[in-house]
């Protein structure tokens, strides 16, 4: 283990430790109204360092495990953290808690499909001109994502058993089950039955072999795995600690409460997003899309079943249906993603379109 630790950059060791120490210190700093601005600023810097460390260690583990299992494990790890963050805030209660799942899932879809995918396509296109990927696997992921998104965020507005953007308990249980079934089926296809649909094309793989470092040793992988867990745990705890301060700032600014869900989703998805962008800049667009679309699917396919089960146990009434404007944005995003990722090749144009849609989403948050 000592040799494995020596091979890692020193900052990737210091950042997770600083995150854990800051998490412990936050227990004594925070109160019901949150942190002071100075303490919040320091914790935010530590949080960013933990995010960067999580990206590094996740890439080490993914490199050792190989595609597509590496990106799948990364997506699951981040989603587990996201579920823990959502549930912990919901258990604490407070205004807007019943809509937190909806706001976070909606924000995650917009961040991933428009923000992350847009950056990957734009930056990858600027650096490499035209990039390629296996279109069959991407189409499979987009079809699954479209079904899950509409069923979870749009359909609740149109059922008649309960007025408003709600599912009844029976409907919520059914949606949770079928969401998990769809996600589990997708994972079976991705990792076993049709694994080749999600692997880089042979031509790209051969071209990039000279740029790929040798896989890390088993010991280095274990160390990075442990540090990845520490980094992600500190990220979610520090994000939870900063949430009351963020809510206070949002209320004081007169901004909508849904911005809190956007910030939470952004913090949780930042490690995966950065890893996807780095892969695109290294001309590994297949890896980028595996990360991005896999995390979007996991956000719904894993988060909704767990939260639905807890809602049934604790008798929560979840607001899942989105507003009419967000309904249009979801449908437009799915349509654009289907068209822009339908040829197996991408340029900067597709990236620019997705980033404009992301800008529209952010703008309408403050000016609905």
Image (cartoon, helix red, strand yellow):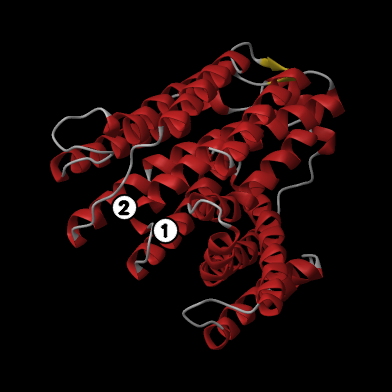
Indicate the quadrant containing the N terminus: top left, top right, bottom left or bottom right. bottom right
User: Is the residue under label 1 in contact with that under label 2 (CB below 8 Å)?
Assistant: yes
User: Which residue does the image show at 52% across and 43% down from the upper left?
Assistant: 108
Q: Is residue 193 visible?
A: no
Q: Looking at the image, which is closer to me, 252 or 176?
A: 252
Q: How crowded is mark 1: few (under 14 residues within 10 Å), some or many (20 or more)?
A: many
When the figure is inspected, residue 361 is found, relative to residue 197, above or below; the finding is: below
Residue 307 numbered mark, or none: 2
Decide: few, some or many residues near mark 2? Use Cα within 10 Å; few <14, some 14-19, many ≥20: many
Pinpoint residue 337: horizontal percent, then vertical percent: 57, 21
Pinpoint residue 325: horizontal percent, then vertical percent. 47, 29
Q: 98 left or right of 75?
A: left
Q: Where is residue 286 in the image (x, y as percent from the top left)?
A: 65, 29
Q: In which quarter of the image is residue 112?
A: top right
Q: Residue at x 60, y 18 (%)?
A: 341
Relative horizontal placement of residue 267, taking residue 147 as reference (left or right)? right
Q: What element carries label 1?
A: helix
Q: In which quarter of the image is residue 131?
A: top right
Q: Which mark is residue 86?
A: 1
Q: Which mark is residue 186?
A: none
Query: Between 78 and 116, which is closer to the camera in this rendering?
Result: 116
Q: Point out the residue furthest to the bottom here.
A: 28
Position of 38 with respect to 24 (left or right) is: right
Q: Residue at x 37, y 28 (%)?
A: 150
Vertical arrangement, residue 244 with respect to residue 364, above or below: below
| Residue 115 higher or lower than 53, as above or below | above
- Helix, strand or loop at disc 2? helix
Can residue 65 be seen at all in this image of the molecule? yes
The residue shown at (63%, 34%) is: 358
Query: Picture quarter containing residue 17?
Result: bottom right
Q: Where is residue 185 in the image (x, y as percent from the top left)?
A: 35, 31
């Amino acid at each position: 283990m000592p040799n494995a630790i020596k091979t890692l950059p020193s900052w990737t060791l210091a950042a997770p430790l600083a995150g854990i120490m800051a998490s412990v210190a936050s227990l004594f700093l925070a109160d019901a109204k949150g942190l002071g601005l100075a303490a919040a600023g320091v914790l935010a810097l530590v949080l960013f360092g933990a995010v960067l460390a999580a990206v590094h260690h996740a890439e080490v583990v993914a490199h050792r495990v190989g595609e597509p299992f590496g990106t799948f494990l990364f997506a699951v790890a981040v989603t587990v953290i996201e579920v823990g963050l959502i549930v912990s805030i919901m258990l604490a209660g407070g205004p807007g808690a019943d809509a937190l799942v909806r706001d976070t899932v909606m924000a995650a879809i917009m961040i991933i499909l428009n923000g992350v995918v847009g950056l990957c396509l734009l930056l990858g296109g600027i650096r490499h001109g035209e990039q390629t990927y296996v279109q069959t696997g991407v189409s499979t992921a987009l079809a699954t994502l479209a079904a899950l998104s509409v069923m979870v965020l749009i359909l609740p507005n149109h059922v008649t058993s309960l007025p408003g953007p709600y599912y009844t308990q029976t409907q919520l249980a059914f949606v949770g089950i079928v969401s998990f079934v769809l996600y589990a089926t997708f994972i079976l296809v991705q990792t076993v039955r049709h694994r080749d649909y999600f692997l880089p094309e042979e031509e790209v793989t051969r071209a990039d072999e000279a740029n790929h470092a040798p896989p890390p040793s088993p010991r280095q992988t274990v160390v990075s795995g442990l540090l990845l867990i520490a980094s992600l745990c500190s990220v979610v705890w520090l994000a939870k600690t900063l949430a009351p301060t963020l809510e206070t700032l949002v209320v004081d600014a007169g901004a909508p409460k849904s911005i809190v869900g956007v910030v939470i989703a952004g913090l949780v998805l930042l490690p995966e997003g950065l890893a996807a962008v780095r892969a695109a800049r290294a001309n590994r667009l297949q890896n980028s899309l595996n990360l991005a679309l896999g995390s979007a699917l996991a956000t719904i396919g894993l988060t909704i079943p767990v939260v639905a089960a807890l809602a049934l146990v604790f008798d929560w009434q979840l607001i899942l249906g989105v507003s009419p404007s967000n309904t249009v944005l979801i449908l437009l995003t799915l349509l654009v993603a289907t068209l822009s990722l339908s040829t197996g090749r991408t340029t900067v144009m597709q990236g620019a379109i997705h980033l404009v849609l992301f800008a529209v989403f952010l703008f309408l948050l403050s000016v609905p």
